[in-house]
Image: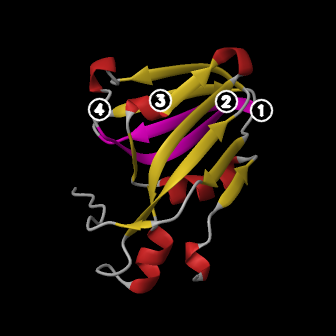
Amino acid sequence: MSETSKPLKLIALDANDLEVISAHCQDAVLRLDDIGYVKKNRRFAIILNRFDWETALKTGRDHQLRRRRTALRFECVDQAEHINLKSKQKDHALKLLAINFEEKDAPSGVLSLIFSGDCEIKLTVECIEIELNDLGAMWETKNLPDHKL
């Protein structure tokens, strides 16, 4: 087992930690059915298929293209809202581009999950408390994420 194939388990408690998690989740794909919010528990969660950029960048663009099932858990969430996500798109694949944080009244603020296609989820949070946890083995993919300008 190579070092890059070990499952990730990361926690973000501030904006710097969040940048690391955001980078690992860039170009992850998911469906609307993979998203859940339990208001009573103040917890928001996503299951996604994360692209393994670390290995792809180390081995070259045409080798070792892989994805891995990953869970993202957001705690201390007071409100969740979406922009341009339609319930009829449940089977439509979403591509996560970035997770950003805008501080409002430290340490609270708004986390923005930015998706391709001008879609977004905004989470109003008491503080940054996010866990990324890989769930299983990687699998090969033929598709290298592409960002056409």
Image location (x, y in percent) of residue 62: 28, 80
Q: Which residue is depicted at the point 75% across and 27% down?
A: 126
Q: Quadrant of residue 96?
A: top left
* Residue for badge 4: 91
Please name the amino acid that badge 3 sits on: Ile
Q: In the picture shown, does residue 56 fall above or below 118?
A: below
Rate crowding at label 3 as few (under 14), some (14 to 19) or many (20 or more) other CA atoms within 10 Å: some
Instruction: Calculate the distance from the C-alpha at mark 3 to the C-alpha at mark 1.
Output: 21 Å
* Residue for badge 3: 121
Q: Nearer the viewer, mark 3 or mark 1?
A: 3
Q: Which mark is residue 81?
A: none
Q: Nearer the viewer, mark 2 or mark 4?
A: 4
Please name the amino acid that badge 1 sits on: Ala
Tell me the quarter of the image containing the C terminus.
Answer: bottom left
Instruction: Calculate the distance from the C-alpha at mark 2 to the C-alpha at mark 3.
Output: 14 Å
Q: Nearer the viewer, mark 1 or mark 4?
A: 4
Q: In the picture shown, does residue 79 fall above or below 18?
A: above
Q: Is residue 107 magenta?
A: yes
Q: In the picture shown, does residue 32 fall above or below 27?
A: above
Q: In the image, 1: left or right of 54?
A: right
| Viewer-nearest residue: 91 or 57 | 91
Callout 1 touching callout 2 (CB < 8 Å): yes
* Residue for badge 1: 106
Callout 2 touching callout 4 (CB < 8 Å): no
Callout 1 touching callout 4 (CB < 8 Å): no
Please name the amino acid that badge 2 sits on: Gly
Please name the amino acid that badge 4 sits on: Asp
Rate crowding at label 4 as few (under 14), some (14 to 19) or many (20 or more) other CA atoms within 10 Å: few
- Residue range in magenta is 93-116
* Residue for badge 2: 109
Q: In the image, 119: left or right of 122?
A: left
Kind of element beneath mark 1: loop
